[in-house]
Amino acid sequence: MTVSRRVFMMQAAAASGVLASQQALAQVKLEENDPQAVALGYKHDSTKVDNKKYPKHAATQLCNNCQLYQGKAADAWGGCPLFGAKQVAGKGWCSAYVKKA
């Protein structure tokens, strides 16, 4: 089957639009006032966590060294399955923290 140049260009444009929209969705950063974030005590900055409310919090616990963090340890933001397509701060923290093995 041969594809005309016109059809190929239209398909390529549509495919690039889909990829761009998927990348844009992946770049959405989690807000601290998001209901799921509030429920888990998420903070962008681990030093801002209320230690009275979360006594198990430790200064060494950061999203980027949590088992759930899907970015690289050096990434400023990365995915977390707890928050769907939204990204969490590498220096953040939530009460679901599990030390990376």
Image (cartoon, grey):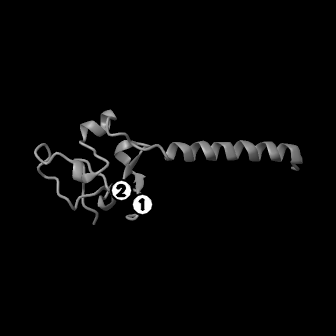
| Dot 2 alpha-carbon crowd within 10 angstroms: few under 14, some 14 to 19, many 20 or more | many
Query: SS of the residue at dot 1?
Result: loop
Q: CA distance from mark 1 to mark 2?
A: 6 Å
Marks 1 and 2 close (CB-CB < 8 Å): yes
Location of residue 64 by image quarter:
bottom left
Q: Residue 97, percent across and down?
A: 24, 53
In the orientation shown, which residue stands out farthest toward the front?
Answer: 48
Residue designated by label 1: 75
Image location (x, y in percent) of residue 62: 28, 57
From the viewer's perspective, is 64 left or right of 18?
Answer: left
Residue at screen point 69% across, 45% down? 15
Q: Is residue 91 left or right of residue 7?
A: left
| Local SS, label 2 | loop
Judging by the rendered image, the residue that carries numbered circle 2 is: 90
Q: Is residue 19 left or right of residue 49?
A: right
Query: Image point 40% across, 65% down: which residue?
Result: 74
Q: Which residue occupies 60% across, 42% down? A: 21
Q: Residue at x 47, y 43 (%)?
A: 28
Q: Earlier in the sequence, mark 1 or mark 2?
A: 1
Write down the quadrant of residue 82 in the picture: top left
Q: Nearer the viewer, residue 71 or 92?
A: 92
Of the pair 13 and 52, the residue shown nearer to us: 52
Q: Amino acid at mark 1?
A: Asp
- Most foreground residue, 83 or 87: 87
Amino acid type indicated by mark 2: Gly
Where is residue 5 drawn, in percent x and y?
Answer: 88, 48
Q: Which mark is residue 66?
A: none
Residue 48, how many percent across, how many down?
23, 48
